[in-house]
Amino acid sequence: MHNKLKNGETTVAALVAEYVDRAKASDLNAFREIFADADIAAQVAIAQNMFADGTATAMTGMPIALKDNILFAEHTVSGSSKILEHYVASYDATVVTKMKAAGAVIIGRTNMDEFAMGSSTENSAYGPSKNPHDTTKVPGGSSGGSAAAVAAGLCVVAFGSDTGGSIRQPGAFCGIVGLLPTYGSVSRHGLIALGSSLDVIGPMAHTVADAEAFYTAFKGQDQYDSTSVAETSTRPLKKKLAMPKNIFGNGGLDPELEKNFKDLLEKLKGEGYTIDEVDLPHFADSLAVYYILMPAEVSSNLARLDGIRYGDRAASTSINDVYGDTRGALFGIETRRRILVGTYVLSHGYYDAYYNKAIALRATIRAELENALQQYDAILTPTTPTPAFGIGEKVNDPVSMYLSDLFTVPANIAQHPAISIPSGKSTAGLPFGVQFIGPRFGEAVLFELGKTIENIR
Amino acid sequence: MATVGKDIGAILGFVDTIQTVQLGGDQVADAGKNNVFRDDAVQALPASHDLIEAAPLHQDHFVKVPKVIE
């Protein structure tokens, strides 16, 4: 696409118009908003000038989308919540600043689970998105709108955020690549915070090469995010992979997904990879740790949404009623569940038993992963235990919904990078994904492994 | 609220599994004590004008918010 623009075979205006027309015609509810024609035209003009003056990069002119929790100045950003329905961002997220400088064309904001809490987009205050492969199924979440938009060809790349799997799981459900970068490698300045020790912005794309190009363009230390760092790891590939013990045989995996995964293991061995089962004793405890730490951080982060400084306000006559009525009326049920759980695990008398224990277990899980990654290039798992489930199937059973994050959460707990690569489809046409968890700042290893999967699947 | 209460009970029941995980006493006691500090040195702060300008609404060098009490 970049070469066609560079050679003059097409123009930025024509390319962007093609994607915008498809996005407007789509009924997937992938987008919360497609930006105004004048807005997009102004960005197109900047991109066209960059081609004219020779400063264009691989990102220039590419139609991209932002998850509805990434601030884009002078545009509404709502976290797909009613409480921020009319909130207009007063500044750009750092990743947006970088994309504008690269000449990418941001065509809209995508639907998501409210404040990134969910695995299906069914928690969006504006209705669920649909999976392009089967519109009766969810696209995954919380970056489900971004995943659906990329999979359906409504944009070239979409930005998501991943706190417990929210890029990788929808990537797997929609048959696209989803990268969770190392925590700290991408600035969180301008990302509406969910779990501040867990959140990472990442790319969702059709190919590993596209994900790599965009990640390279927007990573880096940022003065506005004191948790951001500029490290990279350049260790060579050993062609040795680890798999946690006990993935198979306990009835947790969809049978077709399990067969697809096992077939892929054989193909990797055919490429010269050794794959060892390793004991990661607390890998499975990651989910419980996550659902203590993340709600705790959510209860703190969402305290700022009080009807005073940001967003909408319920009419009330006392300050406490303003807080209670605003949050009660304008937060969805999953948001309220997680705030209540988070407040509970941080409360006097329960803090040590839940929060402190989870922090200690987090350190143990991280040490186990890092120890394994001393000897192996990456840890290999299916991205999800099942392919995409039906809309409405799990929405009233929160714990059942949480279990779809079983394989993705450990990387967030340990603050390691991970990538989901499409690995095949079910007989019903639903995509499967395979996940690699890599060493911290070892995204180059993940890209190489991902390209291997693209060649052999 | 009854539904939310039941859901929260189920969630807490799920995360309660960490109580069965055995860790060293020191690991839990020391949890959260490793903090990240920066040097106690004077750093340039953003200008107050820039901070005020970043607020959605501002007037006369103050951040402006809707009235709470009429």
Image (cartoon, coloured by chain):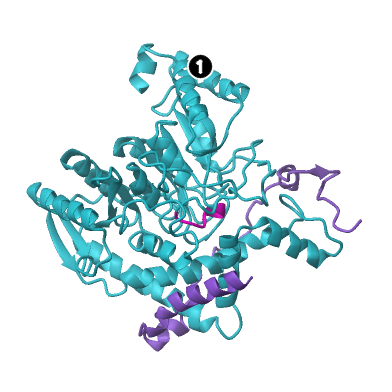
Query: Residue A149 versus residue A444: which sits nearer the camera?
Result: A149
Is B10 included in the stretch rendered in magenta? Answer: no
Which shade is chain B?
A: purple
Look at the numbered disc 1 and give the secondary structure of its residue.
Answer: helix
Does residue A347 sit above or below A2 in this rendering? below
Give residue A191's position: percent from left, percent from top: 55, 49
Quadrant (top left, top right, bottom left, bottom right) of the N terminus of chain A: top left
Give residue B52's position: percent from left, percent from top: 75, 46
* Quarter of image, res A164: bottom left
Does residue A250 sit above or below A215 in this rendering? below
Is A117 included in the stretch rendered in magenta? Answer: yes
Residue appearing at x 68%, y 41% in the figure: A88
Does residue A438 sit above or below A149 in this rendering? below
The answer to whether residue B40 is visible is no
Q: In this view, does A348 lie to the left or right of A166?
A: right
Quadrant (top left, top right, bottom left, bottom right) of the C terminus of chain A: top left
Query: Residue A177 versus residue A447: which sits nearer the camera?
Result: A177
Q: In this view, does B68 lie to the left or right of A36?
A: right
Residue appearing at x 26%, y 58% in the figure: A254
The residue wearing badge 1 is: A49
Amino acid type for the residue under numbered disc 1: Asn
Chain letter, cyan in picture: A
Residue appearing at x 55%, y 76% in the figure: A345
Highlighted range, magenta: A114-119
Crowd tier of the residue under label 1, counting other residues whose Cα lies within 10 Å: few below 14, some 14–19, many 20 or above: some
